[in-house]
Image (spheres, grey):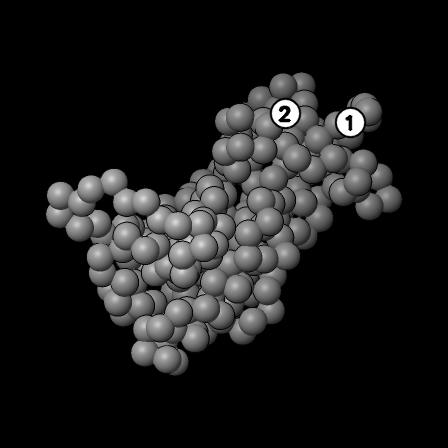
Amino acid sequence: MQAYEVPRAPNQTVLDLVTWVQRHLEPDLGYRYACRVGMCGSCAMMVNGAPRWTCRTLAETAAKAGALEIRPLRNLPVVKDLATDMAPFFDKWRRADGKFHGRAAQDFAAIAMDAPGRAEASAGIECIGCGVCYAACDTVAALPAYLGPAALNRAWTCLNDAREAAPRRHLAAIADQAVLCHGQENCSAHCPVGLDPAGGIFGLKRALLFGGNV
């Protein structure tokens, strides 16, 4: 850890502070960001022990006694300084069979707004893969092989898609994983876009219990 003193300014974000340190004090500081407006999620870091998007976190709000402790996202390999390797995170999406299986030559599918599963599929698909829920997950911390909330949320989204041609493939891919969730719901509590991956995991558990019926 390295301590820095930075100037305070109104409406300053944590990402603003990290950028100021890189530009004025530590030119080789490694960190990641892209949009700076809460759209890409690539600026996620641990801020005073909690995973957050640093571009949307006000320094004044997050600071304790005028200080911030900023670390790379938990549960992921560190590339350099505050930048983590996201490859294991997305590898687990693939292990969860987190892709849509369409039917051959499928025409445009009109799904009614009140169709079963429509709300769950529409909500879960808004995940942008920032890794905040993954960093918040204590089960991942204890069991590194655990797929994690984002991958399981993706499986839940595909399972509820009325156009999905192979829903049981998703259940088979996560059958030994959903049950590992302890139900602490840290993932849902920290999701920056307000998704409920814990609810999706509970849904997967129900589907597994009742033979695939969600």
Q: For numbered disc 2, what is the local secondary structure?
A: helix
**In the image shown, does 18 or 125 lie closer to the viewer?**
125
Q: Position of residue 92 (x, y in %)?
A: 35, 56
User: Furthest residue to the top?
Assistant: 24
**In the image shown, does 120 or 20 lie closer to the viewer?**
120
- Looking at the rendering, in which quadrant would you find the C terminus? bottom left
Q: What residue would you read off at disc 1?
A: 11
Q: Earlier in the sequence, mark 2 or mark 1?
A: 1
For image coordinates 22% across by 60% down, the residue present is 166
Q: What residue would you read off at disc 2?
A: 19
Residue 188 sits above or below residue 64 on the image: below
**Quarter of the image holding residue 3?**
top right
Kind of residue at badge 1: Asn
For image coordinates 39% across by 80% down, the residue present is 209
Q: Position of residue 80 (x, y in %)?
A: 49, 38
Q: For numbered disc 1, what is the local secondary structure?
A: loop
**Quarter of the image holding residue 55?**
top right
Residue 164 sits above or below residue 141 on the image: above
Q: CA distance from mark 2 to mark 1?
A: 15 Å
Judge from the rendering whether residue 12 lies leftward or rightward of residue 101; answer left or right. right
